[in-house]
């Protein structure tokens, strides 16, 4: 009940949000349009007290689906031990671009670099957009649905 | 081992302190019983490798208990685990730093063939970069399997023509 009210409160307070269907645990979850992401997350941090970015996950919903790519952010408010999940769908299906949250939450720095490596996200305003897990010159993005499962030709890799 | 002429009754035995043998037999006898492994522990196989070093399985029975973490002091690289493409170059460099004679044991499915990780990030078998002498199956292999593999390696060492290449790097 308490969780549901948080979701409703946020949706009432920020009209650009849409409620997101949660799982069986009914954790509060909302969709945010990319243009409002930074504004909303800054408000979460400054006025709502969500002090931790627990995780950030990229998602490829499948080839031919639009919007194809989303990033899902997991926030925590340690004072009340509440959890909020927000999803932000990128509008471009080839080079999905979203604003970077690294200046708001330092934890986003490496998580965004990982998502950029594996899904090919482009995070606008990221302070250090080098690859994190893959090496320079790696072709493709391994967690995209159209990446071959067995990998590409690795003989051309520098290793 | 081919130690001949040890019978004291014929006058050329141990009492003179002289044993006649072939150089290959002696060299291989020495080498095969002092294989100092370099534990290239990359994932869970390394746990089994540690188990083999413990008292229950006791790799010391075969003269292999001297695990060296420096490639300069070791004879046999035991590649225990998943070789990712990022670590492959380091594995290769460590092998190059080992002094001859040197051997490689691919321990487990991942080191032998990539195992279940047929993905973008994993080398499909360490034999793509190193000359592997013994492959050990298992995921991970039981300690007995590793000991069996190491005894196979000893067997292989005993058959080498080591004197011919004694002063040559391999």
Image (cartoon, coloured by chain):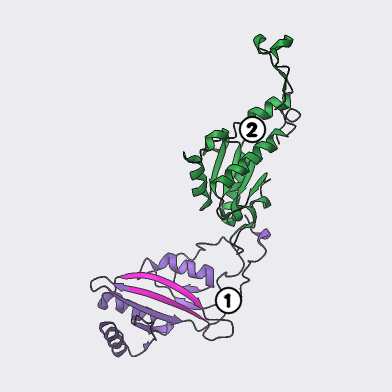
Chain colours: A purple, B green
Q: Is residue A83 left or right of residue B102?
A: left
Indicate the position of residue B123 as horizontal and vertical percent values. Answer: 62, 57
Instruction: Please provide percent x and percent y for residue B65.
Output: 52, 35
Nearest to the observer: residue A110 or residue A124:
A110
Residue B45 versus residue A128 in the image, above or below: above
Q: Chain of mark 1?
A: A
> For the view shown, which residue lies furthest in the left direction?
A79
Residue A138, horizontal then vertical, whole percent: 60, 64
Tell me if residue A60 is in the magenta stretch: yes
Q: Residues within 10 Å of mark 2 (few under 14, many from 20)?
A: many
Apparent side of residue A133 relative to residue A11 in the rendered image (left or right): right
Name the mark nearer the viewer: 2 or 1: 2
Looking at the rendering, the stretch of residues picked out in magenta corresponds to A50-75
A31 is within the stretch colored magenta: no
On screen, residue A154 above or below A148:
above
Tell me: residue A127, above or below residue A10: above
- Mark 1 lies on residue: A145
Name the residue rendered at 38%, 80% in the picture: A86
- Mark sitting on residue A156: none
Gap in angstroms between the C-alphas marked 2 and 1: 50 Å
For label 2, the SS is: helix
- Examine the image and state in which quarter residue B138 appears: bottom right
Q: Position of residue B49 (x, y in %)?
A: 52, 45
Q: Which residue is mark 2?
A: B32
Neighbour tally class for label 1: few under 14, some 14-19, many 20 plus, Cα within 10 Å: some
Any part of residue B65 in sight: no
């Amino acid at each position: 009940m308490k969780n549901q009210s948080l979701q409703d409160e946020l949706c009432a307070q920020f009209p650009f949000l849409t409620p997101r269907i949660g799982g069986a645990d009914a954790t509060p979850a909302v969709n945010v349009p990319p243009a409002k992401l930074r504004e909303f997350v800054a408000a979460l941090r400054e006025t709502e007290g969500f002090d931790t970015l627990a995780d950030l996950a990229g998602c490829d919903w499948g080839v031919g689906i639009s919007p194809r790519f989303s990033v899902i952010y997991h926030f925590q408010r340690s004072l009340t031990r509440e959890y909020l999940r927000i999803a932000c769908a990128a509008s471009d299906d080839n080079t999905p671009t979203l604003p970077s949250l690294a200046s708001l939450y330092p934890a986003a720095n490496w998580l965004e670099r990982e998502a950029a490596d594996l899904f090919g996200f482009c995070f606008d305003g990221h302070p250090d957009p080098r690859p994190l897990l893959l090496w320079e010159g790696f072709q493709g993005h391994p967690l995209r649905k159209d990446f071959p499962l067995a990998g590409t030709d690795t003989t051309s890799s520098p290793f | 081992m081919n130690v001949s002429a040890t019978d004291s009754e014929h006058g050329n035995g141990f009492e003179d302190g002289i044993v006649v043998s072939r150089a290959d037999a002696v060299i291989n006898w020495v080498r095969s019983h002092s294989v100092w492994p370099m534990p290239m522990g990359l994932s869970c196989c390394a746990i089994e490798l540690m188990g083999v070093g413990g008292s229950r399985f006791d790799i010391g029975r075969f003269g292999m208990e001297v695990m060296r973490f420096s490639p300069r002091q070791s004879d046999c690289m035991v590649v225990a685990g998943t070789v990712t493409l990022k670590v492959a170059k380091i594995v290769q460099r460590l092998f190059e730093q080992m002094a001859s004679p040197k051997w490689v044991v691919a321990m487990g499915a991942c080191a032998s063939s990539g195992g279940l990780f047929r993905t973008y990030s994993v080398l499909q078998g360490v034999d793509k970069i190193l000359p592997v002498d013994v492959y050990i199956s298992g995921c991970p292999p039981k300690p007995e399997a590793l000991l069996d593999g190491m005894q196979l390696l000893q067997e292989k060492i005993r058959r080498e023509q080591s004197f011919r290449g004694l002063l040559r790097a391999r």
